[in-house]
Amino acid sequence: MSLETKKPNLDSVTTINADGSRYAIHPADVKGKFTIMRRVTAAILLIIYIALPWIPINGYPAVFLDIEERRFHLFGITLLTHDLWILFFLIAGLAFALFVLSSVVGRVWCGWYCPYTVFLDHVYRRVERLIEGNSLKRKQLDKSPWNKNKLIKRGSKWFSFLIISLILAHIFLSYFISLPKLWEHMQANPVDHIGEFLFILSFTLVFCFMFGYFREQFCIIMCPYGRFQSSLTDDDTITVAYDYKRGEPRGKKRRIVPELEPAPEPVGDCVDCRRCVNVCPTGIDIRNGIQLECVACSSCIDACNDIMKKLKRPQGLIRYDSVNNIESGERKILRPRTYMYGIFILLGAVAMFYTLKSKARPFYADVARLEGSNYVSNEDGVRNMFSFEIINKKNEAMSFKIEPEASEEIQFTDTGSITIPKGETKKFTMRVFTTKQGYEGAKDVKFNIISSDGSTIILKQRFTGPNQFLYKGTAGQDESLNTNK
């Protein structure tokens, strides 16, 4: 049974054979300081992912995207659909933060913090190693014919993948449905909550496919971040790199007897053991140079350091470094592009904080003309009816007062103080009236909506009525205008 490992090159992707078929990669396990740090980081991220829907902040989960009520609770802050403009700043800020990260340290995000990598390398592949064994045993299992042993191992692996995917899908759904409601729906007939059932079914199948079969293909072929990474990095970017000056030419150093043998050709520290290739999750050979498929996971660094330690040679033949530092010994972390990205982030932060200060409010308010009538006029005067809507976005009850702009001609109904419980909406009407003698035609009126915490929103609406001169020249005649007619 041939278990020869495919030799990576720069002309084609390792995971795709010459005939277009899939070449399965089974990365070997590796130990080292970077691997330990990655696993600790992944464990923290997994705990955060699982715990966020359970952590209450101001009466709601830390992250709760309530699609049904169209309210989004993020670490104690409640946003309505009217506040989604804030997402522009958040998304833009994250994008430029990734730009800075990529320009300085390459695809460290992909190898250390990306949710896809965390699930694939630290959940699914760990389970696969536990059931099917190390990389050599997994390759042997691939090549072996279907028998009882292979059926049990593959069946156990895919059943485990299915259970894990089901759990992850339910956790993901808990970000959109409260945990008590989710638990209630889980115990009910799936037909009664067909939307949630299809959501769980779809994401379970997607997780099984992506992490059980498609795997590193997503990082290499589909991930948009990996596509534009090459435009964000340069020769000063610190990423996983092979010190070819020290490692080349490759080969094993051998002992000779000077009197009997000629001096051998000098060789570098790289013994061409291919350990760095065997542990790579995307199947590349880092010795061929920086490549698009590399996710900077540092597995090859730990693998090479382990070999160097056994050979009693200096570690760091493969390390986090820049191309320029390896070639000339000069390292530039801060350079024009990092300054430019930093300036963009600063400008975005200033714009966001200014916008939040000037526009963000703990409540939403709106005013509209009462449906069905523009105005009513008679001998006493002209009357308009306005409908108000106030949404309390805070996670505590708030009181509101409507204070119209002072005017001698226009009179307002005093609504008094209105108390709205947390997260609820209140609708009410207000009558705006002017006498016949004081009527001066249509004009804008302003309403100051003042909350108990001092926040104020100013609303403006048009006070309408009949033609001023015709109306005052007509006595004893009622006039009303219905917008539905």
Image (cartoon, rainbow, N blue to C red):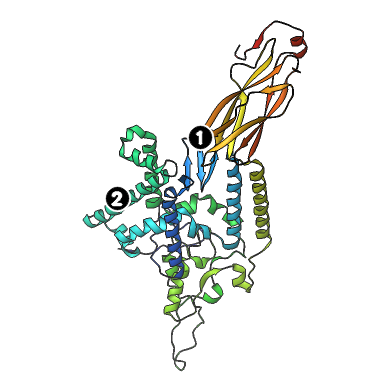
Return the residue at label 2: 159
Q: Residue furthest bottom?
A: 259
Q: Quadrant of residue 206?
A: top left
Q: Mark 2: few, some, or many residues within 10 Å (few <14, many ≥20)?
A: few
Residue 49 image point, x, y percent:
44, 52
What kind of element bears circle 2? helix
Q: Position of residue 175 (x, y in %)?
A: 44, 44
SS at mark 1?
A: loop
- x, y percent for residue 174: 41, 44
User: 217 or 50: which is nearer to us?
Assistant: 50
- Observer-nearest residue: 297 or 188? 188
Label 1: how many Cα within 10 Å (few below 14, some 14–19, many 20+):
some
How many marks are shown on the rendered structure? 2
**In the depicted view, which residue is nearer to us: 37 or 124?**
37
The image's mark for residue 424 is: 1
Residue 225 tag number = none
- Pointer 2 with pointer 1, Cβ within 8 A: no
Residue 323 to residue 421: above or below: below
Query: Which residue appears farthest toward the top when viewing the image?
Result: 476
